[in-house]
Amino acid sequence: MKKTFKTWFMGRFFHSSCKAAYARCGLPKSTVSAILAENYAIAARSKPMNDDRLISSYMMGMYFIAMNKKSGLSPQENYKIIESAIRKSSLMKKKMGSAEDYLSEDKIPSRMEWAEETRRRRGENNWVVDVLPKCAEYDLGYDYHECGICKLCRDEGCFELAKYLCKLDYVIADMMNVKLARTTTLADGGDKCDFRYSLK
């Protein structure tokens, strides 16, 4: 994957957000440094992902993989660290915006254009998605037929980690004060990830 300011910044962001938890866990500085170095090594060897809407998710996946390769902690322990870091981040909260803004029907046309672009598969590790406008059951739906994080985890030989990153979708929805319902995911062997968002 091509190195950009955004890929560099996102790696630093996740690392800085987790450092206090590493200290509480007693991880030596050499291990903490190794996590960041591995994050950038994964970024350098990863397949192209050129979808700007989901680049932060892709980088979060890289960082979580690096944590599991280098920290010596279990996937569940690493999940708790990154979940806590995301919940405490004022930058993440600002980036997410309000529930009303996220679910606004005014955004449907641009989302439909985005979905059409994903089907062109311009990057090997891009997501492929259908956007489902508001109906009686939900305010916004997505059906993801391909997932960049699942592809990345498979490339790195750790597909089992993808399911932990799926759990973060609920954390992010909760932070936006949005209800997320989902019955199946690609990480758990489903044929799609069926996101259904509604106002709480």
Image (cartoon, rainbow, N blue to C red):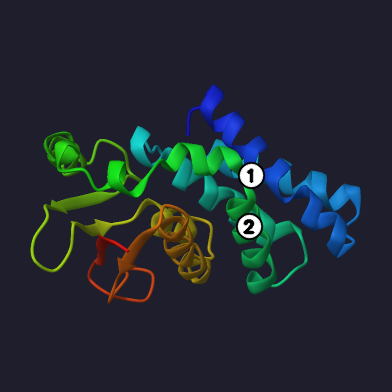
Q: Is residue 3 visible?
A: no
Q: Secondary structure at mark 2?
A: helix
Instruction: Tell me, yes or no, whether the two marked residues, 2 and 1, touch with CB atoms within 8 Å.
Output: yes
Q: Which residue is situated farthest in the left direction here?
A: 135
Residue type beneath disc 1: Phe
Residue type beneath disc 2: Ile
Q: Is residue 37 left or right of residue 114?
A: right
Residue at which label 1 appears: 14
Q: Which residue is situated farthest in the top direction here?
A: 5
Q: Is residue 155 left or right of residue 85?
A: left
Residue count near mark 1 (Cα–Cα under 10 Å), binned few <14, some 14–19, many ≥20: many
Residue count near mark 2 (Cα–Cα under 10 Å), binned few <14, some 14–19, many ≥20: many
User: Image quadrant of residue 141?
Assistant: bottom left
User: Image quadrant of residue 80?
Assistant: bottom right
* Residue 60 locus on image (x, y percent): 53, 48
Q: Is residue 176 visible?
A: yes
Q: Which mark is residue 82?
A: 2
The quarter of the image holding the C terminus is bottom left
* Residue 73 locus on image (x, y percent): 75, 68
* Residue 187 locus on image (x, y percent): 38, 69
User: Image quadrant of residue 119?
Assistant: top left
* Residue 27 locus on image (x, y percent): 87, 58
The residue nearer to you, when weighing 106 against 191, is: 106
The residue sitting at 43% across, 39% down in the picture is: 55
Q: Marks 2/1: CA distance?
A: 8 Å
The residue sitting at 24% across, 48% down in the picture is: 103
